[in-house]
Amino acid sequence: MLDIKNLSVSYGAIDAVKNISMHVDDGEIVSLIGANGAGKTTTLHTITGLVPAKSGSVMFNGHDLLKERNHNIVTYGMAHIPEGRHVFTRMSVQENLEMGAFSIKNDSTMAADLDMVFDLFPRLKERRRQLAGTLSGGEQQMVAMGRALMSHPNTILMDEPSMGLSPKLVKEIFAIIRKLHAEGITVLLVEQNAKMALSIADRAYVLETGSITMEGDAKDLLHDEKVRKAYLGA
Ligand code: ATP
């Protein structure tokens, strides 16, 4: 379980995240929605240790992530799929995936894990020798997801997986997220695409200029008048 309490994060004079509390229970999909600049990415980056917190706590399965210096979230079963995918453009698809399993030394485990990812994303299997930089945005998203899965995470943090993708590809990526969830993976999903994010989630939080202004059952938020006006273009 991921439990964030009274988290505040600043970049110099800019208060990007202001005293937020949220939690993700095992087996849930929780979405964090909000406009551009609301603080969604900052929240994820603080969980993963990329950005320091000003105050608050982030507990993950008994580990205090803000207190443990240089922690590696992967060893705790958490994987981060960053905004903009960050694939290694000059490496092949397969080499990118192998980078996700850097802690696994055994060749047969590596082969089995590659097969698992290729079963999930047959298109990556066809393109395994292709340089990742020459793939489409949707395929790069698949590489980023596949790379994260190579570490056998129990929890994945996804930042804007729908960004820049066609509606058809967004559906494809969300279908994969559903499948991972069905296999028992816990998901914290950050999205500007509120409609998709609320459709897939169990619960959700709305972040506005660094503060959580609404939270609850995702289906309730999907039908909430204020959310519809502000985030669903209704
Ligand atoms: P987006 O979807 O556009 O990434 P977001 O909700 O993820 O938006 P953040 O990227 O977390 O929002 O940004 C929150 C606030 O912090 C914004 O005001 C942003 O300008 C500021 N900010 C983000 N990163 C930095 C940084 N490295 N240095 C200074 N300010 C930053």
Image (cartoon, rainbow, N blue to C red):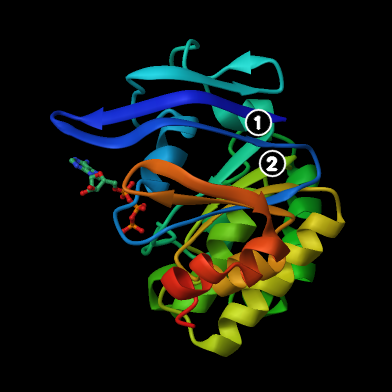
Is 198 rendered above or below residue 207? below
Is 141 rendered above or below residue 150? below
Residue type, mark 1 in image: Leu
- On the image, the x and y values in percent for residue 207 come to 44, 49
Q: Is residue 63 left or right of residue 11?
A: right
Is 166 rendered above or below residue 65? below
What mark, if any, has residue 155 been given in the picture? 2
Instruction: Name which residue lies at 66% across and 26% down.
Output: 76
Instruction: Name which residue lies at 70% across and 15% down.
Output: 62
Instruction: Name which residue lies at 60% across and 42% down.
Output: 79
Which is nearer the eye, 33 or 175?
A: 33
Query: How far, Cα to Cα, is label 2 from label 1?
Result: 9 Å
Which is nearer the eye, 32 or 162?
A: 32
Instruction: Name which residue lies at 63% across and 69% down.
Output: 222
Say which quarter of the image contains residue 45. Answer: top left
- Quadrant where the N terminus sits is top right
Residue type, mark 2 in image: Thr
Q: Which residue was labeled with disc 1? A: 2
